[in-house]
Structures are given as structure tokens and as C-alpha cells.
Amino acid sequence: MTPSKDLKTILSKLQFPDDAQVMRQIVDQALQVKIRMGRITRKIVVMSGKGGVGKSMSTVNLALAFARRGQKVGVLDVDLNGPCVPKMLGITGRRFEITPDGAVPPEGPLGIRVASMDFFLRDHAPVRWNGSMELSPVWLGMLEMNVIREFLADIAWGNLDLLLADLPPGAAADKPPAIAGFLPELDGAVVVTTPSEVTTDVVRKSVMYARDVGIPVIGLLENMSGYHCPQCGHESDLFVGNVEALAADLDIPVLGKIPFDRELSRSCDTGTPILDGVHPIAKRFDEVAQRIVDCLDFKRILAERL
């Protein structure tokens, strides 16, 4: 299978004349994924059981934080129906570079490589299934997984220190275990939440589900932990909740707290990410990145001693 394909070609490959051909392609893709993922040191998924918590924003800024540490970083935008990572990084409209080794993803700020369905779509165009209407006019879970597998098999990430996978919003039952299967030696998940009690109730279920399907949870990232006033710098509570209690109950750490900041929101909307490491919000994400590294190193050392 060659990497020179557009969205229509990808879709056409999802319609097979016989089961044997389906299985042959899945096996070939799985082998290719294993080879490509072997060149990536660490693989982390960013997920949440609740939509609207700022998961993609967190993924983008975590990628920037790790890149500021001098690491080679890639971001896989797994939200096929609402991809927004390229917009947040200011690289909308880019295309993959087709090489003999595969499709090289476009680079964003600080050399971050990004793979996203956004690169295949016209402006504001939805992703739709053009096959039998007996199935659905929109993406079905199995079809999404096929495309994600194609992404991972065909994309030439090269040698990376870290790959962050931005999972779709919500807690669709098929996504976490499928992604875990696609990413050999997955290091774990960063789960994004807000202090809202409604959100933490859903996130609790998401963490328990991730554990049930074998995904280690690195920790919680509390987004919108308060409102950061641009005039005086004071932070005020936005929600009523207790993420620390949730973390203690689930026996996982709170990796950090990110306040709602208008400048951060504007940077994501305009595709002008905050690159300056001295910015207060950038410092928060740098601290979260360090805690993630500390947690993973601790688990590695503990596993070696057992």
C-alpha cells in the first residue's frame, strides 16, 4: 500500500470484496505500525470522558512544552470529525510530503510534526461516509478505526522522543482500547478534567474504563481551574469541585492546574501558540510536562526493581 492517497482513496480502501483481503491489509498495517512506532520513545494519549474540557488545547500546549525541552514531538489528531490541532498550531492548509518511506507530516512551531484529518478536508467540509446509506451517512466507529490505522501505518514520523495522541471528546467505548492496540508499548494516558462536579463524575468513569482496558493512567490535568485576570493577575474560582479528592480516590496524581486565560484562548483561536517559555501559562504547562516525565521515570524505575 502506497502513501500517495487522498481522503477518497482512503475511503475506497475501506470497501473490500472479501474477508481475506480485509485481514491481509489489517495484518500488513499492524506490522507497519509496529515498525514505525518502534522509532518513537514515548507514546501518550490525551483523553477525557467529557467534551468541552479543553483537551485539544491541553494536547497542543503539552506538545509545545515538551518541544521547549528540546524533544522531537509528534501529535496525532485522532478526532476525525472535528480536527482542530492544525488550527491551534497555525498550520491549517498544509499537506503531507510524500516520500518513498511514507507520508511525512507537516511541521508546526518548534518542529512539532502533526498528522490530522484536517489536512485532507476543504474548509468547513464535514467528513462523511460515501458508502451504503444502510450503514450511516456519518462515520461509523469501525471506519474511524480503519482510517486511524492507515494514519499510523502510512505516516513516516521518523525518530521522535514523544508522540501525543489527541483522542476524540467523550468516552466512546471503541476508541481507547483501539488506540491502545495501535500504539505498541503505550506509556499511558493524561486525563483532562475541570473542577466541575459534573465533569469529575464522568472523568471518574473514564479513568476506571481506561484501566479496565489496560491503559495506564499517568495522572489528571485540571483545566479551567480558575479565571486568570489579565489586568491584576488574580485568579478566581470558576467551578465548584474537588479534583484532589477525585485523584486521591483513584490513587493518581494531579499533574497540574491550568487557569482559564483569555490570551491562551485567543492564541488557540488565531493559530498563534504561546511559544515564550517565560509566559505564566507556558510555565504551567512546562511544569506539567516535567511531572509527566517524573511519573513515567518513577514507574520505569519501580518496574525494573520488581
Image: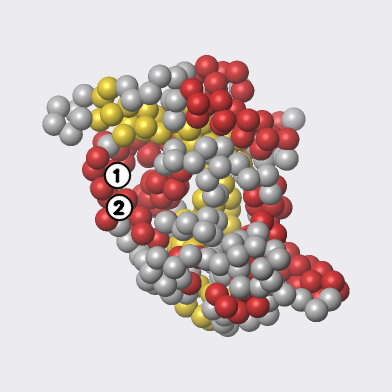
**Residue at (57, 30) in percent of width and height:** 202
Cα separation, mark 2 vs mark 1, equals 6 Å
Horizontal and vertical percent position of residue 151 = 59, 66
How many tags in the picture? 2
Horizontal and vertical percent position of residue 181 = 71, 52
Name of the residue lying farthest toward the front: 134
Mark 2, residue position: 269
**Residue at (42, 56) in percent of width and height:** 84
Which amino acid is tagged 2? Asp
- Rate crowding at label 2 as few (under 14), some (14 to 19) or many (20 or more) other CA atoms within 10 Å: some
Q: Secondary structure at mark 1?
A: helix
User: Toward the viewer: 250 or 39?
Assistant: 250
Which amino acid is tagged 1? Ser
Horizontal and vertical percent position of residue 189 = 58, 41
User: Toward the viewer: 271 or 196?
Assistant: 196
- Rate crowding at label 1 as few (under 14), some (14 to 19) or many (20 or more) other CA atoms within 10 Å: some
Q: Secondary structure at mark 2?
A: helix
Q: Residue 304, located in which quarter of the rendered image?
A: top right
**Would you place residue 102 above or below residue 127 in this image?**
below
Q: How is the image coloured?
A: secondary structure
Mark 1, residue position: 265
Q: Quadrant of the N terminus?
A: bottom right
**Would you place residue 48 above or below residue 9 in this image?**
above
Marks 2 & 1, CB-CB < 8 Å contact: yes
Q: Is residue 285 visible?
A: yes
Left or right: residue 17 compared with residue 208? right
**Would you place residue 73 above or below residue 266 in this image?**
below
Horizontal and vertical percent position of residue 279 = 24, 40
Q: Residue 94, located in which quarter of the rendered image?
A: bottom left
